[in-house]
Amino acid sequence: MESYGRERRHIGALTYYAIREELDTAFLRWVFFLLDLGTWVILIFPAAGLIGVLISSLIAGHLDSTQILVHIATLVTTTTASVLVIVTEVQVHGDLTIPWPLIVLGVIGGLLTGIEVPAERTSDNSRQLGPATDPGTEESDGDPGADRAHQSPGRGRALIVLGWTLRGLTLLMFLIGAPLYDDLVSEAGLPLWTHPLLAVALVVPPLLLLGVSAGLLERGRRHRHRIIPSFEELTGQRYLLYLRPFAIDPAMALPPEEAPGWSTRSPFELPGTHEEFLMRQFRGFGRIVAIGQPGERLPALGAERGYLPVDNWQDAVSELIRGAHAVIISAVPGSGTMWEFTEALHATTPTRLLLLVYDDELFHAFREDAGREHARRSTAEPDIDWPPLPQLPDIPPAAHTKGLRWDFPLRGILSFDHQWRPRFTRFPPTVPRLRHVWTIRRLVRRALKPVTDPISRLPPAPSPHTTAEHDESDGTLPK
């Protein structure tokens, strides 16, 4: 009986140790799984993007000595840590296959994200709507005979077809590249040091094709973008007039800044160019027209372009302002824009005037220049019954709202009531963390309703040849 009891205790101990060993093994498997997951998801991929951002910032060359040292130290630390982690994983797992294509994509993504033009330097491709861009006038010293863009619709169609063909080829290369890489790495027996080079060779060409296709599609669309043969065709039509200094056209022709939240962001949230995105908010109220820059080879995307002679453009612009359903002016300093703003003060009614406000520095410069231009013109042109210069208040601070901060260049829109009392409508300062492709568009449309709703209710604009005194249905001008 005693021996039977000892045997049962022995069997129980063996069972206990067997279960304990199995539990320890399962625990260790989970530990190694979490370590591997953290290695790849938390360290390797973000590290690749960070390395790309650091390299692009160093190449841009707009850092001071302290920032350069910090960037170099961070780059060396991140690269060393990543190499050590990869070496450790290879030693532990032996034949571990490192996903070099994904790492290369992360580095390239970081390079593209970090590329920017410093604010203190000027460039035709600058994203800055600020003093870095020369606030030139709407006049041009170019050849008067070359004041109109030259389009080829047939070439535009061919470029669009070629661009979409290259995009399809890019997708095909990405689909083929991943299994091809796995086959070459696993079956060809290539040395370990060749794996990153092979990943670069498979990833870079489709990315280059993607960039080329985007350029071809953009140029094809510009060839097919509508040009107004003569502004006289607008007579009797509802149109909105978009006025701005020509100097901001390169920045407005770039894609709008992406909304934050890379994990929930959709590539279709902000399609087109910056100008297209802004003009789309007013598209339902009539044709949106603008004066094209004399000498430009192709019109920018966004508002329909029409062209005026280099000299005597002011009379034509004044007629366009009088006949416009609404006048949208970028509050950016420029001598031509100052004339257009002061002209709009007496040529249209207050409720038809909108100012696109960007940052404080630009708006303050615009306000000062507008005051000087108003004083100059009211003295030099006493035959015009000038209204007082309306109040242009400071940009109010954004209210605290939930979500991710969105530093969109446009801060808001300044509109006026019948008595020239201003109202500032802020552009959305934040975006939701979780969203789908239509969230941003609905958010912007809802935020700008205090501006767009009054515009939609305005009666038809008077004929350009009708005096402003007869346009009493939406507010009379000061006499």
Image (tube, helix red, strand yellow):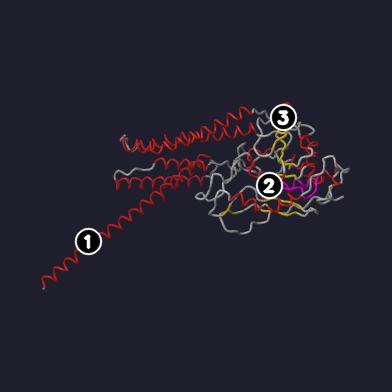
Q: Is residue 283 above or below residue 164?
A: below
Q: Which circle's residue, 1 or 3, is located before the other in the chain?
A: 1
Earlier in the chain: of badge 2 and badge 3, it is 3
Name the residue type under label 1. Answer: Ala
**Looking at the picture, does residue 411 appear above or below residue 210?**
below
What residue is shown at x 33% (from left), y 45% (from top)? 87
Q: The disc labelled 2 sits on which kind of residue?
A: Leu
Q: In terms of secondary structure, where does tag 2 sit?
A: helix
Of circles 1 and 3, the one toward us is: 1
- What residue is disc 3 on? 147
Report the side of 194 relative to 372 (left or right).
left
- How far apart are labels 2 and 3 at the CA level? 29 Å
The residue that mark 1 highlights is 18
Q: Which residue is mark 2?
A: 362
Side of 362 where 376 appears, left or right:
right
Magenta-highlighted residues: 348-373
